[in-house]
Image (cartoon, helix red, strand yellow):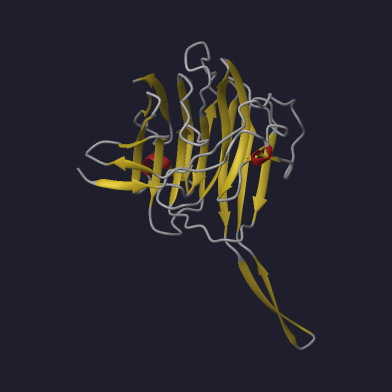
Amino acid sequence: MKKIVLFLLSISFPAFLCAPALAATSTNTNTPLSGYPGFMLGHGYHHSVSGTAALTSENWSGYAATGNSGAFTSVTSTWVQPAVNCAALPKNAYSAYWVGLDGYSDSTVEQIGTEADCVRNQPVYDAWYEMYPSNPYEVSANISVVPNNSYTASVVYTPGTTTTTRKRNRTVVTTTPASYSLSLANNTTGRTYSVTLSPRQTYARSSAEVITEAPYSGGILPLADYGTVNYTHATVNGSPLGAAPGLEDIIMQNPAGMTSTPSSFDVTDENFAVTWSAS
């Protein structure tokens, strides 16, 4: 059985945030999660084992399209926000739902999504984005996260441009840096959030993912019982994710004893489910 190393990056969030009130559409209002005491932001490199079936991970479940550097420019998907079951132990458990570029086989990630946690047996819901290695940002003040509401998330890369013009007998070179647009829409309420960033570093864009995750804070956290989450209209570079080259399905085997398993795609190659279970 071949052993490979996957750089499956994790997000971490303050467990005590309250769900904020619904706010108007914004393009750049957010709160860095590193500002909340008691939580150390970080990421984990986790070993996975490949065989004839799915890969296994300690913190990811879902699908990743993989390829060469620069292969991926966009990823999007829609899901109905699960309502987490916080009645059972452990009383603190966590789950995140996101789309992103990178993170599968490199040490960066560009991602946006929602979070559903159990904090002292009480549900807490948030929205966030991250351009790792920069800190994640909480954006729930811009777009509310409510169980059973529908959300669409996307990450889109726009390459930089260089134009040359002549002005008064001299050459003027204008350069526009490459950028990433990260967007999240609450389809139920019509509210949206987006941010466009031009990072200082270059990202590989060698993978694209639609993932359910157990976040990380000093270690991989217990995965909250979210039941089943249905991902629909999942596309990469504008084409169905399920038909993407280098596609990998990933089963999570959480260190706290939970399992999260993706289904097969339906006939559209755009729709699949991920289901929580106790190991």
Comparing 157 with 52, the one in front is 52
- The residue under the point 33% across, 48% down is 5
- The residue under the point 53% across, 38% down is 11
Q: Is residue 76 visible?
A: no
Q: Is 105 located above or below residue 143 in the figure?
A: below
Q: Is 191 located above or below residue 240 in the figure?
A: above
Query: Where residue 198 appears, x then y in whole percent?
Result: 64, 57
Q: Is residue 65 visible?
A: yes
Q: Is residue 178 left or right of residue 259?
A: right
Query: Where residue 69 appears, x then y in whole percent?
Result: 43, 59
Query: Where residue 247 appears, x then y in whole percent?
Result: 35, 44
In the image, farthest residue toward the left: 1
Comparing 154 with 10, the one in front is 10
Query: Where residue 7 appears, x then y in whole percent?
Result: 41, 47
- Quarter of the image containing the C terminus? top left
Comparing 82 with 172, the one in front is 82
Q: Is residue 253 left or right of residue 214?
A: left
- The residue under the point 68% across, 27% down is 144
Comparing 44 with 248, the one in front is 44
Residue 39 occupies quadrant = top right
- Quarter of the image containing the N terminus? top left
Residue 129 occupies quadrant = top right
